[in-house]
Image (spheres, rainbow, N blue to C red):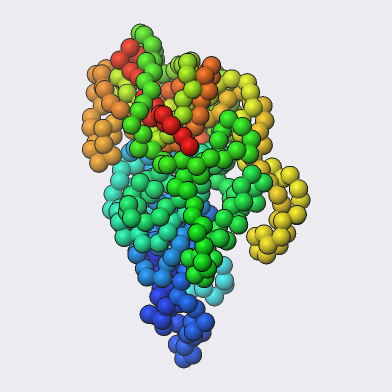
Amino acid sequence: MTNGDYRQIEAYKNVIDWLNGRCRAFTDHTRQRQVTADWSNGKVATTGISYLGTMSNGLATTGVDGLEVIIAEAGISSWYNYYRENGLVTSPGGYPGEDFDSLAELTYSRNLLGGDYLHHNAAHQADLDRVKKELDRASGDYNQFWHDRNYLLHADRVKAEVVFTHGSQDWNVKPLHVFNMFQALPANIKKHLFYHNGAHVYLNNWQSIDFRESMNALLSKKLLSYASSYELPTVIWQDNTGEQSWTSLDDFGNQTSQRTFLLGDGEKVIQNRYETKDYERYGKAYPTFLSDLYQDKAQQVTIDLPIKEDLHLNGKARLHLRLHSSTNKGLLSAQLLELGSKKYLQPYPAVLSVRTMDNGRYHMLDNLTELPFKEAGQRVITKGYLNLQNRHDLLQVEAVTPGEWMDFDFDLQPTIYKLEKGATLRLVLYTTDFEITVRDQTDYQLTIDLAQSSLHLPEMTEAR
């Protein structure tokens, strides 16, 4: 199975080699009629969202000559971080229970034709069985299967100019993917990030930013050698405090200041096992669970923290926790919310005008869209999931001794978010997440020592 590994990436690289005269191509499998790319100037860009953005990330790490620009939109940088997190088996947001083998089955196009199906399906099914064993759904550990699909290991080879787009509310391909790739790129290349407040979505037809023409200017310069002084900022961030507002920033992460919040006094307990009726209700519809969680109605510890001065979060929120488990394991989930009824940017674009933009997707008229700025009770800022057996390191499995206190740091998903003076920051700690984690019904408790626990937020002190 080549999904996501460098054998699949090689197929994309071969096309660029062909466009540059370094590789042969034929009209069909008989290899009797060769096709040459004598029309090509050898300069190539790739673009696309999700899987295509992922392939762009992987392709760039080959350092292939001729690849001038990648536009990686919501792309994966390490497949482990898509289907696993901190030693846990997790699902991409919106697809509870999905794992790598599900995607491999979905993208196996040779089964679409009857002849190919008859010739290849038996071998494909055997390959799927092998993949199911290698991905190791039983433990959630990082192993050779995931190592072979980690593009971050070769990010130092990237030579192309890189454009990323990613959403702060993308819980499918989570923000960690773009953050890690952004940080891993060589210092000498040009890199740019459009960081918006949407989910797993395109932004080519938004009213607030002309992304399509920005890319047209860049590609005309890089691929057609048009004389131009056009340069993109390093980070183009959509301000979450208002509608249709963008600003440029110097970096994603790497802040030198932080704001610390103490979590309180005493001890609080999280019960993992739910009553059967609640477990079944949440299992049938995870949005019901999330609604209860945000309203402090699930099995959770909720801590509200007042924001006394404006705070511009940029990077990974870090929890320092002291807790113990009543059994020899433990799953910990955490979310940070801005709490309070007011207007927030919503994660999915709404149509402002139907079919009014020319040259849209598939060269058709496209809708003009924008993220709505609407009243809501809260806004998710970031979240994270942790196997307590991996509390200090992904590659280190540690025992969880019942009743024994554990001290550790827990990084949540990186993001950029502005909290204004007077806002309320809500921290929610819980175990099973019915959308993301395995739905564990083991009867155990986590006890948190609030007096020895704290939250640390990397803070921008200046923004352009």
Please state which of residues 464 and 428 is positioned toward the viewer in this rendering.
464
Residue sitting at 55 percent across and 35 percent down? 239
Residue sitting at 29 percent across and 31 percent down? 391
Residue 126 seen anywhere in this rendered image of the structure:
no
**Quadrant of the rendered image containing residue 127:** bottom left
Is residue 81 depicted above or below 160 in this figure?
above
**Quadrant of the rendered image containing residue 216:** bottom right
Residue sitting at 73 percent across and 44 percent down? 352
x and y percent of residue 291 in the render?
Answer: 58, 26
Q: Quadrant of the N terminus?
A: bottom left
Please state which of residues 326 and 30 is positioned toward the viewer in this rendering.
30
Please state which of residues 310 and 356 is positioned toward the viewer in this rendering.
310
Residue 205 seen anywhere in this rendered image of the structure:
yes
The residue lying furthest to the top in this view is 266
Residue sitting at 47 percent across and 77 percent down? 41
x and y percent of residue 214 in the render?
Answer: 57, 55
x and y percent of residue 402 in the render?
Answer: 26, 20
Please state which of residues 315 and 29 is positioned toward the viewer in this rendering.
315
